[in-house]
Amino acid sequence: MSTAPDPPARAVRISDLARWREAGQRFAMLTAYDAPTARLLEAAGIPVLLVGDSVADAVLGRSGTVGVTLEEMVHHTAAVARGTERALVVADLPFGSYQVTVEDGMRAALRLVGQGGAHAVKAEGAQVELCARLVRAGVPFMGHVGLTPQAVHQLGGYRVQGRDAQAAQRLQREAQELAEAGAFAVVLEAVPAALAAEITAALPVPTIGIGAGAGCDAQVLVTHDLLGLGSGPAPRFVKAYADLAGVITDAATRFREDVARGEFPDAEHAYD
Ligand code: KIV
């Protein structure tokens, strides 16, 4: 039975993730887009925070991640970095920042680290050369294969990947090549649980699953989904651990009613 690793009192390093995997300790990653939420997640012992391009739908009101810009990613990464002291902050390379040339990707990643304060970057797909170049430049790289939302139009929607033998082999190969190129971890998104477990067993680095079953070394969720703040129907793999949408709506409704009745502010909340 796996125990959750105690996050160290110092800054979390990529070597901690490798150590936890070796010890069979499953760790958790959550997305964060702002300083106060990042502070709370760190206080809850979440060792890795992902400034995901999911900021687009979770926070910025877009549908899908394709429209988010590098400027926006730097802005949110800097907020998360300011809100944390120990968590490993990983920032997503947004759509369009790395697909044309490896040099573009290098420059974008260096901005996320240099200006945003990220400790590592993540990119979607088989970005093997970019991964190798960044690692050589001293920037830790997290891979992401399976359902890669930036490629939603090519994939024909948000659907489970790797269902047939050929697609499964391709996923295995991509994950392996990223690990060989120096990725310190690989996200597996929307992959059948048995395939994810196979990839995990074969890979020399931790896998982080989202919709990929319990056989991964770690799990990630979008924090807004975890907190019950998501908009629209959630995918099957999401488990809401709270209903913050209900809490917020209830608080705002009670405030509106108190104001209407003249009950807010009362004497306690006013200056003499
Ligand atoms: O942007 C994001 O939130 C992600 C996770 C779903 C892994 O990439």
Image (cartoon, rainbow, N blue to C red):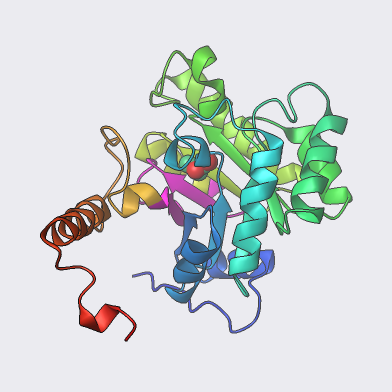
Q: Is residue 86 above or below residue 67?
A: below
Residue 3 % position (x, y): 39, 74
Q: In this image, 258 relative to 58: left or right?
A: left
Q: Can residue 142 be seen in this view?
A: no
Q: In this view, does 220 lie above or below 181?
A: below
Q: Residue at x 63, y 71 (%)?
A: 12
Looking at the figure, which quarter contains the C terminus? bottom left
Q: Residue 210 colored magenta?
A: yes
**23 or 244, which is in the foreground?**
244
Residue 254 % position (x, y): 15, 59
Q: Which residue is drawn at 58% across and 26% down?
A: 67
Q: Residue at x 85, y 41 (%)?
A: 133
**183 or 244, which is in the foreground?**
244
Q: Give the range drawn in magenta.
A: 201-223
Q: In this image, 230 relative to 99: left or right?
A: left
Q: Which residue is drawn at 79% across and 53% down?
A: 115
Residue 65 % position (x, y): 53, 30
Q: Can residue 210 be seen in this view?
A: yes
**253 or 258, which is in the foreground?**
258
Looking at the figure, which quarter contains the N terminus? bottom left
